[in-house]
Image (cartoon, helix red, strand yellow):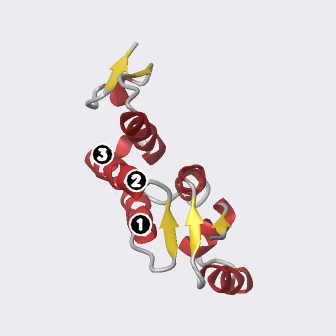
């Protein structure tokens, strides 16, 4: 299966360049795989560059999880991270994703200096 990078995902979410959006749509219509790294970068771009709210970022992740042509790497991890992010949107989606990746890999606690992340189950503030 083919894969997509961050800028393709961002275009699919923002739809802000009609020509590139058409190319991205054509590319993914046969199916495409989304890595956790591309997903994390996409949420960062939506937040930092496009200044989307936490609610909008959460909706974007949900849309990607339910997209007909996209297959996300470890969708169970993404769904758990989305759940944690919706409960504590101030953390940032990538923090929640990092914790859930560590949880699935069996490598907890996740050490952090982030006091808010350290409050989540499975994380430990250092």
Q: Nearer the viewer, mark 2 or mark 3?
A: 2
Mark 3 surroundings within 10 Å by alpha-carbon count, few (fewer than 14), some (14 through 19), many (20 or more): many
- In the image, what residue occupies the spot 59% across and 85% down? 29
- In the image, what residue occupies the spot 54% across and 72% down? 13
Tell me the residue that label 3 is attached to. 84
Q: Secondary structure at mark 1?
A: helix
Tell me the residue that label 2 is attached to. 78
Task: Name which quarter of the figure residue 62 lies in.
Answer: bottom left
- In the image, what residue occupies the spot 41% across and 66% down? 65
Task: Name which quarter of the figure residue 122 lies in.
Answer: top left
Residue 94 higher or lower than 124, as above or below: below
Q: Are marks 1 and 2 in contact (CB under 8 Å)?
A: yes
Image quadrant occupied by the C terminus: top left
Residue 22 higher or lower than 32, as above or below: below
Q: Nearer the viewer, residue 40 or 27?
A: 27
First-in-chain label (3 vs 1)? 1
Tell me the residue that label 1 is attached to. 65
Instruction: Say which mark, if any, is on residue 87.
Output: none
Q: What is the x, y in percent for residue 93?
A: 43, 47
Distance from Cα at disc 2 to Cα at disc 3: 10 Å
Q: Are marks 3 and 1 in contact (CB under 8 Å)?
A: no
Position of 111 compared to 120: left or right?
right
Q: What is the x, y in percent for residue 109?
A: 35, 22
């Amino acid at each position: 299966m083919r894969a997509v990078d961050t800028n393709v995902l961002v275009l699919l979410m923002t739809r802000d360049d009609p020509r590139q959006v058409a190319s991205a749509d054509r590319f993914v219509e046969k199916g495409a795989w989304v890595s956790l790294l591309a997903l994390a970068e996409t949420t960062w771009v939506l937040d930092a560059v496009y200044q989307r709210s936490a609610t909008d970022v959460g909706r974007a992740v949900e849309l990607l999880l339910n997209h007909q042509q996209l297959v996300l790497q470890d969708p169970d991890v993404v769904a758990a991270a989305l759940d944690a992010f919706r409960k504590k949107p101030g953390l940032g989606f990538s923090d929640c994703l990092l914790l859930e990746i560590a949880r699935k890999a069996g490598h907890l606690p996740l050490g952090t200096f982030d006091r808010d992340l350290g409050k989540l189950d499975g994380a430990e503030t250092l």
